[in-house]
Amino acid sequence: MAGSAPAFASTALAQKYACVACHQAAVKVVGPSWKEIGARYGDGKGSAAQLAASMKAGSSGKWGAMPMPAQAQVPDADLQALAQWVLDGAK
């Protein structure tokens, strides 16, 4: 049961910062699913840091026409936790 605490914390963070308005675990909503994001960014060391940086800065054209708005208001520690959670399968 100890392994569920970080997942719960990251699920709570995804809700707190309204990530769930555009992203879901396995289904594309407005943006790609967390599963798709994990598959693209989960390819090596440093991926969580790269994903967190992309979330903070925002992006355009990586996943089609819909841009990812910058999330600069989210603390770096929370971005890192969310990024790692996504890479770990968003469970």
Image (cartoon, rainbow, N blue to C red):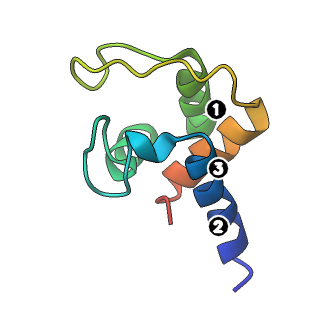
**Residue 81 vertical placement versus 75 (above, below):** below
Query: Is disc 1 surrounded by few (<14), some (14 to 19) or many (20+) residues within 10 Å?
Result: some
Q: Which mark is residue 8?
A: 2
Q: Amino acid at mark 2?
A: Phe
Above or below, comparing residue 12 to residue 62 in the picture: below
Q: Is residue 27 above or below residue 6?
A: above
Would you name the residue on which mark 3 appears? 13
- Residue assigned mark 1: 49
Q: x and y percent of residue 39 in the render?
A: 36, 47
Q: CA distance from mark 3 to mark 2?
A: 9 Å
Identify the secondary structure beneath mark 2.
helix
x then y, percent, for residue 5: 72, 71
Number of residues whose C-alpha sits closer than 10 Å to that of mark 2, classed few (under 14), some (14–19) or many (20 or more) = some
* Left or right: where 88 falls relative to 81: left
Amino acid type shown at disc 1 = Ala
Q: Nearer the viewer, residue 87 or 9?
A: 9
Q: What's the distance in space between the residues labelled 3 and 1, CA to CA? A: 17 Å
Marked residue nearer the N-terminal end (3 or 2): 2
Q: Residue 7 appears in which quarter of the rendering?
A: bottom right
**Cβ atoms under marks 3 and 1 closer than 8 Å:** no
Where in the figure is residue 32, as x and y percent of width and height? 31, 39
